[in-house]
Image (cartoon, rainbow, N blue to C red):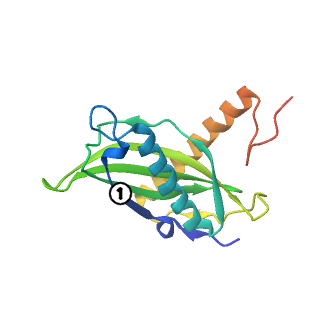
């Protein structure tokens, strides 16, 4: 299968933080941000493999700063690395105060998506080809994170897409 440049998976999603998604402090609910991260990540995964993708894991997410209601939430995502049937996607979340023209990095996360066909069977994905130094760094780091994910799965007795057979 021919590889695809990582740049072809880049996606950007923007949404205005509205009061119906606010907590009591007038900031965006963390769950709403996580939902947007999942959507932005899925867009990037589909751009890479051009087929259905489902979320397999959502790595740790730290909320660095709150998103105020009325601010624009901007999510930037791209595939970091593709494996046999799965892809790691990195998503960065920014908050933009539109009146003051101030942008802040408010959260980041790594997600794993699995490519599936119409019958919900996993399908191979094209290799991701890093071109820039940053893409190459993220590519290598994605391999390290994958090894950690698989080790956690083995310790918990769970298996999943691209998991090596459990040793006895």
Which residue ends up furthest to the right in the rendered image? 168
Q: Which residue is mark 1?
A: 15
Q: Is residue 115 left or right of residue 167?
A: left
Q: Is residue 124 left or right of residue 13?
A: right
Q: Position of residue 15 (x, y in %)?
A: 35, 57
- Tell me where residue 85 sits by quadrant: bottom right
Task: Give the vertical position of 156 relative to 107 (above or below).
Answer: above
Q: Is residue 41 left or right of residue 86?
A: left
How many residues crowd mark 1 within 10 Å: few (<14), some (14–19), many (20+)? few
- Along the viewing direction, whichever of 91 and 74 lies nearer the viewer: 74
Task: Give the vertical position of 152 relative to 88 (above or below).
Answer: above
Q: Is residue 53 left or right of residue 104?
A: right
Residue drawn at x 32%, y 36% as measured from the top left: 64
Q: Quadrant of the N terminus?
A: bottom right
Residue drawn at x 76%, y 58% as measured from the top left: 120
Residue drawn at x 46%, y 67% as measured from the top left: 7
Q: Position of residue 158 (x, y in %)?
A: 75, 33
- Tell me where residue 124 sits by quadrant: bottom right
């Amino acid at each position: 299968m021919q590889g695809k440049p990582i740049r072809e998976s880049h996606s950007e999603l923007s949404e205005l933080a509205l009061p119906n998604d606010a907590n009591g402090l007038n900031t965006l609910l963390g769950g709403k941000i996580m939902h947007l991260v999942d959507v932005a990540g899925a867009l990037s995964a589909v751009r890479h493999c051009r087929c259905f993708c489902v979320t397999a894991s959502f790595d740790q997410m730290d909320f660095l700063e709150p998103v105020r209601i009325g601010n624009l939430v901007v999510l930037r995502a791209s595939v970091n690395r593709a494996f046999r049937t799965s892809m790691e996607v990195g998503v960065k979340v920014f908050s933009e105060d539109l009146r003051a023209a101030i942008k802040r990095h408010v959260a980041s996360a790594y997600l794993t998506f699995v490519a599936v066909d119409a019958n919900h069977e996993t399908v191979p994905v094209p290799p991701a080809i890093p071109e820039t130094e940053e893409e190459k760094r993220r590519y290598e780091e994605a391999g390290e994170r994958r090894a950690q994910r698989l080790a956690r799965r083995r310790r918990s007795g769970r298996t999943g897409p691209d998991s090596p057979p459990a040793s006895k």
